[in-house]
Image (cartoon, rainbow, N blue to C red):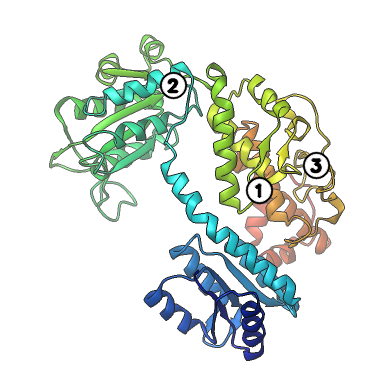
């Protein structure tokens, strides 16, 4: 059994914990500073659990936490802090700490917490191994089995592939699987969503540019074709590519050569192209929005990815996988679906497909009140209504379902900065984001940013009795900025 490491510059804390753990038959090693811990990690490898104070001469426990999380993400870290330093505890949770101990702490509780961290440490390796062995794609439906067979048949080929399917169905996963099982697997896999990049920038993104090619081009930049050299370039939402760029792409596919923007020397491309679209490209060709010759160049092999509503038998398998992954990501116990809840999911059409199911499972991991998710715990988008959260930290935010039962936390008990016994405002915003994503709402970033800025400015103006200059100063922004935001957000006109 690996040792438990205790790091604290206070000798009495080290002594008490060392004796308590020794009485439990647990091996323990103590350190007085962060520097010695870093040396031991480099020379001896990680402990089973690390227990560290936050404020110590010569090094911060939070800095140590950040280093450990970067190098040893499965090592549980318990942070010790004074009651007067609970802001640091919040920072510790945000930094990925397993839990924290507020000094002075109950010794029995400290030992019990360390035992729980040890249990997680024991299971974490097995969980990561299981995750590593999980196929990149899951599916028992006949359509998915046929897709898997097609990927297998293409495993030794470098032919161009066109993947079709609705948004959220997992087209990039198919592209990654084709790359992984191809002769180019040792090369890079580079993905670009042609619909997500402005038309004026897309050419430079794809082909790169020379220094001085246009205003702001202060250095030569490699494009995605160069980045993918020797590997695979995945062009997602190819149906939205502008016609003039379609011509350049056709030339690359035809003769394997291209020029950087502003360049005069041709570059040779050794890249396999896989394209994907949710659109009907034949109809786009008939409409004159997509070049017919490019369509035939891309449509050498076509793979259709079925929407989730056509493979409902896979919903249970996918949901279990997503719930387990969300629990591991959030450091929580995985939730299980009751038969009624699973039946409700299987009856839902999932317009956002697999991505919507994944977001829903993340939402359930955060919001479901018990280990078993019942039908009543599902969000209202899936059918019947559920009670709504009556208090939200974000102005005008749509209400999120309120957990029911003994594990529920009353909305009134939620305080800003709370991380134990309630939900902090950042957690509630994460819950609202998960709800919007699960519902397939568009422009979630813009929506939540608008609400956040509206609430922040409204609160600041209320605090300063409508004085904009003072509100801007307290928020750390300029007067012109706050004036512009008030106009953009449609807030009531008030102030200087």
> Which element carries disc 2, helix, strand or loop?
helix
Between residue 400 and residue 193, name the one nearer to us: 400
Secondary structure type for disc 1: helix
Which of labels 3 and 1 is toward the front? 3
How far apart are the alpha carbons under marks 1 and 2? Answer: 32 Å
Can residue 304 be seen here? The reply is no
Residue tagged by mark 2? 144
Q: Which quadrant of the view contains residue 55?
A: bottom right
Sequence-wise, the earlier of marks 3 and 1 is 3
Looking at marks 3 and 2 on the same chain, the residue that comes earlier in the sequence is marked by: 2
Separation of residues labelled 3 and 2 (CA atoms)? 36 Å
Q: Residues within 10 Å of mark 1 (few under 14, many from 20)?
A: some
Q: Residue at x 50, y 49 (%)?
A: 127
Is 257 on the left-hand or right-hand side of 48?
left
Residue hosting label 1: 430
Quadrant containing the C terminus in the rendered view: bottom right
Q: Residue at x 83, y 41 (%)?
A: 404
Whether 287 is drawn above or below 246: the answer is above
Q: CA distance from mark 3 to mark 1?
A: 14 Å
- Residue 492 picture location, percent across and down: 79, 47
Which residue does the numbered mark 3 point to in the structure image? 402
Question: Neighbour class for label 3 at 10 Å: few (<14), some, many (≥20)?
Answer: many
At label 2, counting other C-alpha atoms closer than 10 Å, the crowd grade (few under 14, some 14-19, many 20 or more) is some
Q: Is residue 399 visible to the viewer in this orientation of the structure?
A: yes
Task: Tell me where residue 69 appears, x and y as whole percent.
Answer: 50, 64
């Amino acid at each position: 059994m690996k040792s438990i490491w205790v790091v604290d510059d206070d000798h009495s804390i080290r002594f008490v914990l060392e004796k308590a753990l020794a009485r439990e038959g647990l091996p323990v090693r103590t350190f007085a500073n962060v520097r010695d811990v870093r040396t031991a990690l480099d020379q001896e490898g990680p402990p089973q659990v690390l227990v560290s104070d936050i404020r110590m001469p010569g090094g911060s426990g939070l800095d140590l936490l950040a280093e450990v999380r970067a190098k040893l993400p499965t090592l549980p870290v318990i942070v010790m802090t004074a009651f007067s330093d609970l802001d640091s505890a919040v920072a510790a949770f945000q930094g990925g700490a397993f839990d924290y101990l507020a000094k002075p702490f109950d010794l029995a509780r400290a030992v019990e917490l360390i035992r729980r961290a040890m249990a997680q440490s024991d299971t974490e390796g097995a969980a990561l191994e299981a995750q590593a062995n999980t196929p990149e794609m899951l599916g028992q439906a006949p359509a998915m089995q046929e897709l898997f067979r097609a990927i297998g048949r293409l495993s030794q080929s470098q032919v161009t592939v066109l993947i079709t399917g609705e948004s959220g169905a997992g087209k990039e996963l198919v592209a990654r699987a084709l790359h992984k099982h191809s002769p180019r697997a040792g090369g890079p896999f580079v993905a670009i969503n042609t619909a997500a990049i402005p038309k004026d920038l897309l050419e430079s993104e794809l082909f790169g540019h020379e220094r001085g090619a246009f205003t702001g081009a202060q250095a030569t930049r490699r494009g995605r074709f160069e980045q993918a050299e020797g590997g695979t370039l995945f062009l997602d939402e190819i149906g939205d590519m502008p016609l003039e760029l379609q011509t350049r792409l056709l030339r690359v596919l035809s003769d394997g050569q291209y020029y950087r923007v502003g360049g005069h020397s041709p570059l040779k491309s050794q890249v396999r192209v896989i394209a994907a679209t949710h659109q009907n490209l034949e109809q786009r060709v008939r409409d004159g929005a997509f070049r017919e010759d490019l369509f035939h160049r891309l449509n050498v092999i076509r793979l259709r990815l079925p929407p989730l509503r056509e493979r409902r038998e896979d919903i249970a398998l996918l949901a279990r996988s997503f719930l387990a992954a969300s629990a591991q990501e959030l450091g929580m116990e995985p939730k299980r679906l009751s038969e009624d809840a699973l039946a409700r999911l299987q009856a839902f059409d999932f317009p956002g497909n697999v991505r919507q199911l994944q977001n829903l499972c993340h939402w359930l991991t955060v919001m479901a009140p018990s280990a078993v998710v019942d039908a009543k715990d599902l969000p209202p988008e899936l059918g019947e209504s559920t009670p709504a959260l009556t208090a939200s930290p974000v102005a005008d935010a749509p209400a999120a379902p309120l957990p029911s039962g003994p594990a529920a936390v009353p909305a009134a008990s939620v305080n800003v900065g709370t991380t134990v016994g309630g939900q902090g405002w950042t957690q509630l915003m994460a819950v609202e984001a998960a709800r919007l994503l699960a519902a397939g709402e568009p422009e979630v970033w813009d929506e939540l940013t608008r609400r956040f800025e509206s609430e922040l400015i409204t609160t600041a103006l209320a605090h300063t009795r409508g004085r904009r200059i003072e509100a801007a100063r307290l928020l750390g922004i300029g007067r012109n900025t706050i004036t512009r935001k008030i106009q953009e957000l449609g807030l009531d006109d008030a102030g200087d």
